[in-house]
Image: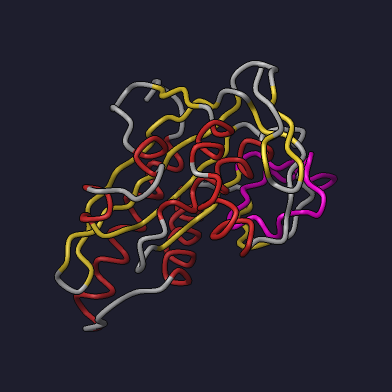
């Protein structure tokens, strides 16, 4: 991780993990839900910034028609006159092995970086350690990143490699559609924090995503048309 980058989301990941760990230790709950991650992460962000933090709000994202739905987390710098979106994030709590859904979220977040003023976009995924040890489909390319390094991937090529699965399990359950995706995407590991959920090993991984260069791959009905 580059010095000076992403400290807010790294700190929030650690704080949210502590909060969720405590929840199952003290409340004797057998499992948590995505809403628990939402609350814990938003509360953690608010502890570490004076900027406005909102959860699950609709925001227009460039290049999507129809729009993909709400953004899970938005951090805005506000003044008396204006509010400027600085950071966005998509969250997922994987009681089932749905780490693969990050392939959709990474396109949504790279698109969000085109919103004027957005400085960084993130994926925050919590899953049992066994899912990280053997991630399904293309989750390894998205989340297994060496510390202090960026991983450059092609999301359109990953989609093309898993097209039958993508069409059935992602497009079949999603209302939004994007017209293009970056030919190359940089992923950077911001945090990987262990926790215990009802006595089982979990980990929350936070990854920053951004497009690399100007080259894009066009999509039609959620399917890549060609590659540069």
* Percent coordinates x, y for residue 32 in the rendering: 35, 74
- Magenta highlight on residue 102: no
Question: Is 77 on the left-hand or right-hand side of 150?
Answer: right
Q: Which one is nearer the viewer's eye here, 73 or 77?
A: 73
**Quadrant location, the C terminus:** top right
- Magenta highlight on residue 77: yes
Q: Which one is nearer the viewer's eye here, 227 or 40?
A: 227
Q: Which one is nearer the viewer's eye here, 54 or 214?
A: 214
**Quadrant location, the N terminus:** top left
- Which residue is located at x 35 percent, y 61 percent? 97
The answer to whether 182 is drawn above or below residue 137 in the figure is above
Question: Is 115 on the left-hand or right-hand side of 127?
Answer: right
The answer to whether 83 is drawn above or below residue 127 in the figure is above
Report the number of discs.
0
Q: Which one is nearer the viewer's eye here, 159 or 95?
A: 159
Highlighted range, magenta: 62-87
* Percent coordinates x, y for residue 139 in the rendering: 39, 44
- Which residue is located at x 69 percent, y 27 percent? 226
* Percent coordinates x, y for residue 151 in the rendering: 41, 24
The answer to whether 220 is drawn above or below residue 129 in the figure is above
Colour convention of the picture: secondary structure
* Percent coordinates x, y for residue 143 in the rendering: 37, 39
- Which residue is located at x 63 percent, y 62 percent? 172
Query: Which residue is the extreme one toward the bottom?
Result: 28
- Which residue is located at x 64 percent, y 45 percent? 108
Query: Which residue is the extreme one toward the right?
Result: 81
Question: Within the image, what quadrant is residue 200 found in?
Answer: bottom left
Query: Which residue is the extreme one toward the front?
Result: 164
């Amino acid at each position: 991780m580059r010095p000076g980058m992403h400290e807010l989301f790294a700190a929030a990941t650690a704080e949210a993990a502590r909060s969720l760990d405590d929840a199952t230790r003290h409340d004797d709950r057998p499992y948590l839900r995505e809403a628990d991650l939402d609350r814990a992460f938003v509360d953690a962000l608010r502890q570490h910034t004076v900027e406005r933090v909102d959860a699950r709000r609709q925001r227009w994202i460039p290049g999507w028609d129809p729009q993909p739905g709400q953004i899970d987390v938005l951090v805005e710098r506000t003044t008396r006159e204006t509010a400027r979106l600085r950071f966005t994030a998509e969250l997922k709590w994987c009681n089932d092995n749905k780490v693969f859904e990050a392939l959709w979220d990474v396109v949504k977040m790279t698109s969000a970086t085109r919103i004027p003023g957005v400085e960084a976009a993130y994926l925050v995924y919590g899953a049992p350690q066994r899912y990280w040890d053997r991630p399904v489909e293309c989750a390894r390319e998205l989340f297994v990143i060496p510390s202090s390094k960026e991983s450059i991937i092609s999301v359109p090529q990953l989609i093309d490699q898993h097209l039958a699965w993508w069409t059935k399990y992602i497009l079949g359950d999603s209302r939004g559609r994007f017209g293009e995706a970056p030919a190359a995407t940089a992923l950077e590991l911001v945090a990987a924090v262990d926790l215990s959920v009802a006595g089982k090993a979990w980990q929350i991984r936070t990854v920053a995503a951004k497009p690399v260069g100007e080259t894009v791959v066009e999509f039609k009905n959620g399917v890549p048309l060609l590659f540069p």
